[in-house]
Amino acid sequence: GTGLGVPGTPGAGGALDIAATPGAPGPPGAELCIHWEGVLVSLPGDGSRVGVVASVMADGRGVRVRPGALSPGSGAWEPEAGADELVLDGHQLELVQPVKKDRVKILSESDTAAGAPGTAGTLIGVDVTDGIVKVDNTTDLAIIDMRLLGKLVA
């Protein structure tokens, strides 16, 4: 680890503080789709297809996704030629995990002051389950749960 953040707790099960109330409509964190524009997601199916969220519906749950693929060489996202945007519920999608040096977007409230939802930055390090983000246009570093970070493409 980098010495920043809190070491992982074995057996914690990865529960998020923002989990939905049992029986509530939508998956845990479904309300988080409001900040997903420009973020890379895995499309429903075998997990091999990806897309970029082009826009989020007014309800904050439905999204329009531009299908595409990751280039085997550079890892850059490329739109699928001639493919129509897909309209999906956010709960049908999984975020593509960002890696060090990726551009990221903070998708939800965290317990740090820096890095409000919708803020972009660069992932400069990973400490167990926390991402260390250099927030754009500031000198701020934010330590954010990796599950609250989306890999930015657009």
Image (tube, rainbow, N blue to C red):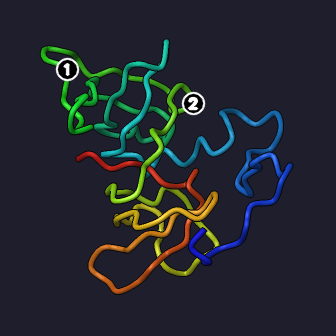
Question: Which label belongs to residue 80?
Answer: 1
Q: Nearer the viewer, mark 2 or mark 1?
A: 1
Residue sitting at the far front: 1
Density class for disc 1 (Cα within 10 Å; few <14, some 14-19, many ≥20) is: some
Q: How far apart are marks 2 and 1 (CA)?
A: 22 Å
- Residue at 47% of width from left, 63% of height from top? 117
**Residue 55 occupies which quadrant of the picture?**
top left
Q: Which amino acid does label 1 sit on?
A: Glu
Q: Position of residue 104 (x, y in %)?
A: 37, 57
| Figure check: 28 above or below 10 | above
Secondary structure category for the residue under label 2: helix
In the image, 38: left or right of 109?
left
Residue sitting at the far right: 11
First-in-chain label (2 vs 1): 1
- Residue at 52% of width from left, 62% of height from top? 126
Q: How many marks?
A: 2
| Figure check: 73 above or below 109 | above
In the image, 131: left or right of 120?
right
Question: Which label belongs to residue 35?
Answer: none
- Residue at 36% of width from left, 44% of height from top? 39
Q: Where is residue 38 in the image (x, y as percent from the top left)?
A: 30, 45
Q: Position of residue 99 (x, y in %)?
A: 42, 51
In the image, 16: left or right of 104?
right
Secondary structure category for the residue under label 1: loop
Check contact, mark 2 vs mark 1: CB within 8 A: no
Question: Which label belongs to residue 91?
Answer: 2
- As rendered, which of 99 and 60 lies closer to the eye? 99
- Residue at 27% of width from left, 25% of height from top? 69
Residue sitting at the far bottom: 139
Q: What residue type is labelled 2?
A: His
